[in-house]
Amino acid sequence: LPMKVEGRFDRTGGELVRLADGRFRVHARLDGRDLRMSGPEWVQRMTLSGEFLDVGRHPEIRFDSSAVEARLLREGGRLRGRLQLRGQAKD
C-alpha cells in the first residue's frame, strides 16, 4: 500500500516581480538541505539522497514562473514556469 508522506522547507526565499505590462513573475529559491519529511527517518534520508534529490551535490531548488495575471495570484490556479533541481531545469 502507498505511504503518505509530507515535506516542508524550514526556510524559503524568493520574490514576486511586477512586470511593465501589469503581470507578475514568481521567483522561488529553496535549499534542499532544509527539507523536512514526515514519517520514518529513512524517508528523510532517501529523499535527500543522491538517488532522489541529491542535495549534497545540488542543494539549490529554483522555480521561475511564466508571466501571470494578478487574478491567478489572488484566486489560485496552475502556475507554469521553469523548475530547476538536481542541476537540471525543465519547463
Image (spheres, rainbow, N blue to C red):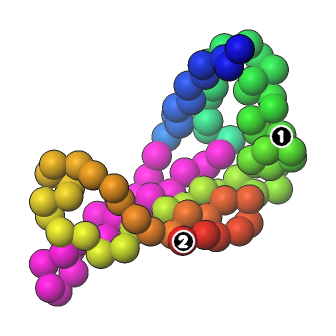
Residue name at image x 64 percent, y 70 percent: 89
Please state, as top left, top right, bottom left or bottom right, where the N terminus lies in the image: top right
List x then y, in percent, for residue 10. Answer: 52, 34
Labels 1 and 2: the sequence-earlier one: 1
Residue bearing the label numbered 2: 91
> Residue sitting at 62 percent across and 28 percent down?
36
**Badge 2 element:** loop
| Residue shown at 13% from the left, 60% from the top | 71
Q: Is residue 33 above or below residue 86?
A: above
Mark 2 residue crowding within 10 angstroms, few (<14) / some (14–19) / many (20+): few
In percent of width and height, residue 51 lies at: 86, 45
Front residue of 49 and 68? 68
Q: Amino acid at mark 1?
A: Ser
Residue 61 covered by magenta stretch = no
Looking at the image, can residue 17 be seen?
no
Instruction: Indicate which disc residue 49 carries.
Output: 1
**Number of residues whose C-alpha sits closer than 10 Å to that of mark 1, classed few (under 14), some (14–19) or many (20 or more):** some
Q: Residue at x 61, y 69 (%)?
A: 90
Residue at the farthest bottom position: 20
User: Is residue 36 toward the left or the right of residue 25 in the image?
Assistant: right
| Magenta segment boundaries in residue numbering | 12-32
The kind of residue tagged 2 is Asp
Question: Secondary structure under badge 1?
Answer: loop
